[in-house]
Amino acid sequence: MKSRKGFTLIELMVVILIVGILAAVAIPMMKGRIDSAKWSEGKAAMGTIATGLRAYAAEKQAVTTTITDLGITVSDLNGTYFDATNYAITSAAYDATANPALTFVLTATNSSLTPTTVTLNQDGTWTP
């Protein structure tokens, strides 16, 4: 009898099952990476706001809770996943005798991403 070479139906079904299981595990992991990449846009803008707040405090020996007072226009904060309405200076205080003299908390929100809110403080600490 002549021997046939090839895969049986069962072998092919096992391979398809394994690929399906791998896809079921990988897709949720990739979703988290996509949100993380989108948050990098928001974090970059928050860094710009923090720099503006530090410069404002150094120049005027005071703080503001309005982003436009920092010289940042609304169009500067508009991006693909975030716009100016997503950012806020949650709290800001300046006391020349304190250490640190400037304290602040910046907040960015985007309800379509996980996490929905990220904050940045004067120490450079991010909290999801």
Image (spheres, rainbow, N blue to C red):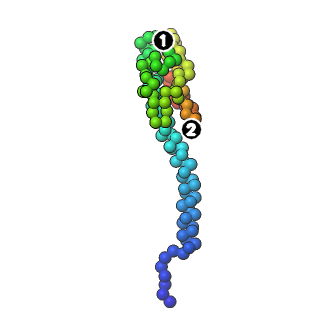
Describe the element under mark 2 as helix, strand or loop.
loop
- Say whether residue 70 is visible: yes
x, y percent for residue 85: 52, 27
Q: Residue at x 52, y 17 (%)?
A: 65
- The crowd level at tag 2 (other Cα within 10 Å; few <14, some 14-19, many 20+) is few
**Amino acid type indicated by mark 1:** Ala
Q: Which of the pair 74/106 is nearer the observer?
A: 74
Instruction: Name the kind of residue labelled 2 in the image.
Output: Ser
* Relative horizontal placement of residue 79, taking residue 105 as reference (left or right): left
Closer to the observer: label 2 or label 1? Answer: 2
Depth order, front residue of 112/127: 112
Which quarter of the figure has residue 16?
bottom right
Where is the C terminus found, in terms of image quarters? top right
Residue at the spot of label 1 = 62
| 114, above or below 100, in the image | below
Where does the image place residue 89, in percent across and percent down from the top left? 53, 22
- Where is residue 122? Give x, y as percent: 50, 22
Q: Residue at x 54, y 70 (%)?
A: 12
Quarter of the figure with residue 105: top right
Q: Is residue 36 above or below residue 126?
A: below
Q: Is residue 109 left or right of residue 51?
A: right
Q: Which mark is residue 123?
A: none
Mark 2 → mark 1, Cα distance in angstroms: 35 Å
Q: Describe the element under mark 1 as helix, strand or loop.
A: loop
Residue at point 42% right, 27% down?
76
- Kindly identify which numbered label has been placed on residue 112: 2
> Counting other residues with Cα less than 10 Å from the Cα at mark 1, is it few (<14), some (14-19), or many (20 or more)?
some
